[in-house]
Amino acid sequence: MSSTIVFIGLGAIGLPMAESIARAGLPVLGVESSSEGRERAATAGISSVESLADAGPLSTVVVMVATAEQLSTVVETALAANSVAGSRWIVMSTVGSDAVHREAARLGAAGAHVIDAPVSGGVARAATGDLALFVSGADDDIAAVRPVLEAMGSPRVVGESVGDGQSVKVVNQHLCAVHVVAAAEALALTEALGLDPAFVLDVVGQGAAQSFMLGDRGPRMLQGEDAPVRSQIGIFVKDTGLVAEAAIAAGISLPVLEAARGRFLRADAAGLRTRDDSSVIETYRTVGA
């Protein structure tokens, strides 16, 4: 692929994803609205512009924004510039199937093609180009962008329809949310029992109770306010909302998800929205938790 890959959203996970594409030998131009983000990109060797309107002709576009509203704004900017005909858009944000259907219809009407490819793995795996990608869309479109997808991780085709990838990501986020809160609750119990949480984390992490989230978030839970921000509480507020909406549409009750969502909402209400999601453990440390 010789055309420049336009990568929209150079945040905590977007920048290392763009770097992975560049390491694969593909030309990348970032689009990032914040000056701080553009400075970080420059330090990482990624050229960037402030707006999609400044990106020039579009061929392959990767979108890694945070919300459905941001995705809609990006699409509106592209449509206003009449620059989408013939382009392929890889939507990697977790925004839910309804949002992807809606924006794919708008882009499709203007002659663009959309590949739905939300990711899992977090910042650490983004940095190593080892993300899990839940990919859906037309076979020809997926084949055309496969080098871009493979540069970022392991693409798994999960369906032929745009939106199927988002549905799989909803299931993924259900499990992730529950596992993070379960880890927080277990470590809070450890503290209440007067045990050394670091020691217990090491011990149980060697047995049947081990999980990725326990091993990854557990140490950060013990760091408290000093924990680095890898994924914000606000992301799980958004994502558990998407899971809850999908469950309502499907007519299924998810009481375990609702319990976990309640903890993230409590953390958000306590002013922890921009803290690392491991900070959900703080909801067990407050009076009356």
Image (cartoon, rainbow, N blue to C red):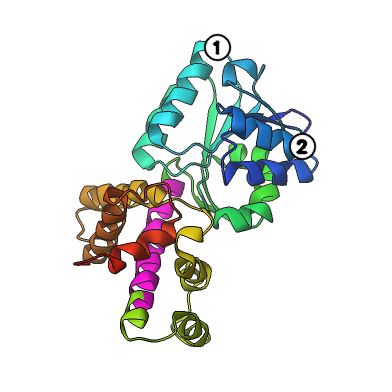
Determine crowd level at label 1: few under 14, some 14-19, many 20+ residues with C-alpha closer than 10 A: few
Residue 155 horizontal/vertical position (percent): 60, 53
What residue is pinned by disc 1?
A: 82
Nearer to the camera, 122 or 109: 122
Q: Residue at x 40, y 86 (%)?
A: 195
In reply to whether residue 181 is colored magenta, the answer given is: yes
Q: Residue at x 78, y 45 (%)?
A: 23
Magenta stretch: dominant secondary structure: helix
Quote the CA–CA distance across marks 1 and 2: 29 Å
Residue 98 horizontal/vertical position (percent): 34, 37
Say which quarter of the image contains residue 100.
top left
**Mark toward the start of the polypeptide (1 vs 2):** 2
Image side of residue 187 versus residue 121, left or right: left
Say which quarter of the image contains residue 185.
bottom left
In reply to whether residue 178 is colored magenta, the answer given is: yes
Nearer to the camera, 6 or 220: 220
Amino acid type assigned to the residue bearing label 2 in the image: Gly
Look at discs 1 and 2 and give the one toward the viewer.
Answer: 2
- The boundaries of the magenta stretch are 164-187
Image side of residue 107 versus residue 189, left or right: right
Q: Which mark is residue 224?
A: none
**Residue 79 versus residue 2 in the image, above or below:** above
Q: Residue at x 23, y 60 (%)?
A: 258
What residue is pinned by disc 2?
A: 45
Amino acid type assigned to the residue bearing label 1 in the image: Asn
Residue 260 horizontal/vertical position (percent): 29, 62
Q: Secondary structure at mark 2?
A: loop
